[in-house]
Amino acid sequence: MLSAISLGIYEFRKYLVLSLMISLIAIPICDAMVIQRDRNRNEMYGEAFWIYGFSIYTMSDRELAEALPPEWGYNDGNHVLPEYLENVNYEYPVFGLIFFAIATWLYPGTGGLQPMWLNFLLVLVFNLNLVLIAILLREKLHKANWARFFFAGYFTYGLLMSAGGGKLEPIVDCLLLMSLVLWRENQNGKAMFTLGLSVQTKLYTAVAFPLMFLASPLSSVWFILSLLMTVVPVFFGADFGSLISHLFNLSSYSSYIVNPLYPGLAFSTPELVDNVVVSTYPWPPALIPLTIYAFFMLSTIKTYIPERREFEGKSFRMKLLTLRPFYLYLLPGILFVFRWVMPWYLYWLAPLVVLYDRDERARGYLQQVTLIGLLYMLGLLANWPYFWANPLPQFMEHFPYGLWTIGGLFLLVLLTGVAFVIWKWVFSRRSRLDEKAAEKRAAEMSGELII
């Protein structure tokens, strides 16, 4: 895998330079224009880990901010979750905590440049992800439109998650993509162990485990061994109650429902007063996204169901493995199940498109991901009395400059264009110089006189 990564970095070095230039431009602009609560919160918990150890899992954000020295500046309201999540303790799995703990140890001292240091580390991981995707897609990146569409979409998503949000997603994806590269190299044990680390950063990549298990059941031992990283801290004070509440849709995580795809809104949309549910009411238009999605799936699912002849002569395990395209195609529908789905969750499962062998299936999978994104926006309109009164105003508080944030976006686009022009000029000039040098060497070899 390291050889493949090294070769990929060398092959795409010109484009990685441009990506890094854009990322470094985006970091200070986004830091100024967006309150990156997840990054700030992880920074606080990373610093606190060296004081309280794994017992920080039993503390809410505000409890921890008040317990830490006031001069550290964590009690400013921007390092804690919004008020409607004030009872939530730290819920990210252990590997994510360890990443931020090490990052804050490498760059100690709160405030100042430390937040942007965290963004920078995530940017490096995001750019590594681009290389891993290129390795997995190989020639499809040059030949298939769906591959280029996915790559462009992931670039935008990854840039927002790393430079713009300081979130854990780039690390989760990096470990997932590494496990897929290792799997293709038939290093099944290492792939399972790496996937286990990914799941212990955020849980959603666990959907890849059944496929790897069916292909090589014995290698799952390494997945289980990796889970010791989460099991052992339980004996040192770690408590994952908030994570479990989040996973199982419990209202103890939040009384808010921020997923406009969630069908439960049709039967009991909450009416909130001061972040407390005072009553519920039926709102049938909430079923519009699910209805459209059901019709779409019924009209497209046939492409992903294997034909009978594909099962003939195979063992039960191999028959299940034959259903891989069907299983993958059903996965995005999980987003309809959970009460808490933020906009960036919609691209969580997109990287699994690299597991498709046939272009038409990969294209259809991306079409489904795109449709769900559009239905998410439609759901905001269909449920407008609830979302416009509660979740959306809370979400917009992350943009302290309001509409002026659009100005920051235009500045980012402008500077990106300038960076592209400079990048193009530098590499075009270097290419011309390389061509002249090659012509000179060829002339010398042929015995021509060079003046």
Image (cartoon, grey):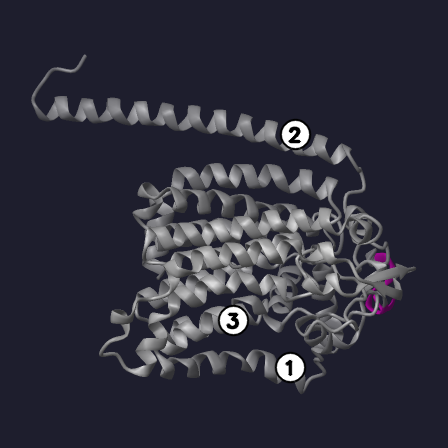
Residue 223 is a magenta residue: no
Quickly name the residue at label 2: 410
Q: Residue 93 bears which disc, if any? A: none
Residue drawn at (83%, 55%), measured in percent from left and top?
73
Q: Are marks 1 and 3 in contact (CB under 8 Å)?
A: no
Residue 176 in the image: state x and y as whole percent: 47, 64
Classify residue 208 as left or right of residue 2: right
Q: Main secondary structure of the magenta part?
A: helix
Residue 264 in the image: state x and y as whole percent: 72, 65
Q: Amino acid at mark 2?
A: Phe
Quickly name the residue at label 1: 233
Q: Which callout, 2 or 1, points to the residue nearer the camera?
A: 2
Confirm whether residue 120 shows in the render.
no
Q: Nearer the viewer, residue 211 or 410?
A: 211
Q: Which callout, 1 or 3, points to the residue nearer the camera?
A: 3
Quickly name the residue at label 3: 206
Residue 269 in the image: state x and y as whole percent: 79, 62
Residue drawn at (43%, 80%), measured in percent from left and top?
222
**Spatial CA span between label 1 and label 3:** 20 Å
Local SS, label 3? helix
Residue 228 in the image: state x and y as whole percent: 55, 82
Quarter the C terminus occupies? top left
